[in-house]
Image (spheres, rainbow, N blue to C red):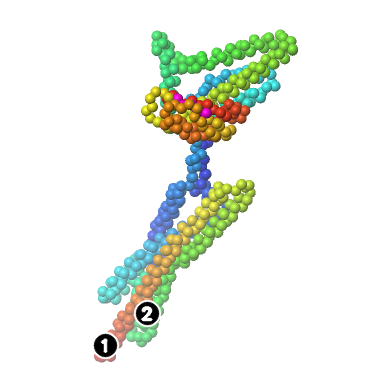
Amino acid sequence: MVRLPGDNSEPGKLRAALFALLVHAAFLALLVFGLNWKNEVSEMMSVDLWAELPRHPVEPPSSAAKVIPEPVKVKPQPQQKTQPQPQPVIKAAPPPVRKPDIALKDKTEKPQLKEEVKKPEPVKKEVPKKEPTKKPVEKLVPKEEVKKPEPVKKVEQKTEKKEDVRQQAEAQKQAQQREREAAAAKAERARADGEIEKYREMIKAKIRSRIIMPPDLPGNPAVEFTVTLLPGGDVLTVTLRKSSGYTAFDEAVERAIYLAKPLPLPPDPGLFNAFRNLDLKVYYRE
Amino acid sequence: MSQVITQDLSFFHLVSGASLPVQLVMLLLLLASFVSWWFIFRKLFTLRQEIKQTDEFENIFWRGSDLNALYQRAAGARHAVGSMERIFEAGFREFTKYQSGVDIGPIMDSTRGAMRAVYQREMDRLESHLSFLATVGSVSPYVGLFGTVWGIMNAFRELSNVGQATIAHVAPGIAEALIATAMGLFAAIPAVIAYNRYASDTAQLATRYESFIEEVSNVLQRRVAKPRDMANFS
């Protein structure tokens, strides 16, 4: 028989391949985009944000700690101990940059800083020539002026002390060592106090962030609570010590205390005793 | 980096994280799925065209056109000729070879034989690849299942190494294993549907062709008989 040339010609082989590709692309797209492959655990997103950190109690102990270990190498331990503790401050600080919620807080903070920088300007406008060159310098100066004097003085004292130490006898050295130890203990105590104060502020701030304030209370009432804490930061009991006179406000604060748990506690378990029975005073207005 | 705790279960991550046998199974299934879809579309176009051409030719044929003209048309325009037209062409050519008054029996036998041959070839052409679709439809779920079972076996074996077993340890392994089953089903379901559809379409066409062969041979037989009768009269 005559084989007809049209026998093998099938219509749209290429077109069929194209359609097949299309079907698979659609299926793949369905798999990739149609399903929510990533399961985000949203409950774990508890981030404590501190717009303001109590800086003053932290700084002196760190400078004191740096002073001590220079001559005596026996006490590097306090340095090591003090180093990890500032870290929570660093960790807590970065989140504000990412979160839009905090962007508002940052904005409120920035004007304050700007005011500080701008304030000197009107005074220095009397000297208009130096303005362009000085501006960057001036911005740096006020900060350094505040911080620098302390360490400089201490270093000076140090050098004087060193000279004395060389002149004196070994017995005197021992006496000095004792003095240093005492000073170190003092610094340690000051540092602990600063730490306690810092965390007290953090606890207050965290509770405050959870309060749903009842609207329109007259004046600035204050409520006082005694909060019994557990070592993990859990709240055991909350007892009303002094009512503000407005039950709505009292209850709002009490609820906020429970909502705020776990409360931030210093990583050093030795400091927990200061938090076991925590007296809190919360004002209606800050 | 981010503090958001996510379990990375993105599709590509799952596929790339699967063990080699599972990946092979996935590749095989993807290939099978692709080829079966290719055939599905090819067959769709072919059958649609075939049915259209058959309708057209039947229409012309039963309108009572001249058989010689029909034969000329079929033999002349070969590119757009349907199966039915080809069957007719083969039968008529065989028939014209015997015009010089032989017995009616052998003429009709060989004419029918020629049409049968073309019919068989055409049916072969129409049914090609259908067996592949049937194979994919019946086998690929099992292949996918094999991949899944293998993946789950691995997931549980790894689970035995973990002291405290949680569902989070097995979940990714099972998820990646189940992709194989999903792919198997994705390949199988359209293949089965297409196979059933095309098989019935082809069977319909086959009965149409067969009845057409009978009808054409009847028509031709009448054509042979008529001149003979006339000759007997004269």
**What amino acid is found at the position of numbered circle 1 in the picture?**
Met
Q: Which residue is drawn at 40% across and 66% down?
A: B197
Label 1 lies in what chain?
B
Is residue A225 in the magenta section? yes
Q: Main secondary structure of the magenta part?
A: strand
- Whole-percent x, y for residue A198 in the image: 54, 25
Determine whether the residue tagged by mark 1 lies in a helix, strand or loop: helix
Work out whether B212 lies above or below A143: below
Q: Would you call the spot at circle 2 few (<14 residues within 10 Å), some (14-19), or many (20 or more)?
A: many
Q: Which mark is residue B230?
A: 1
Q: Which residue is drawn at 59% across and 29% down?
A: A272
Give the quadrant of residue A176: top right
Work out whether residue B130 or residue A47 is closer to the camera in this orientation and state it: A47
Residue sitting farthest toward the left: B234
Residue A5 seen: no
Q: Would you call the spot at circle 1 few (<14 residues within 10 Å), some (14-19), or many (20 or more)?
A: few
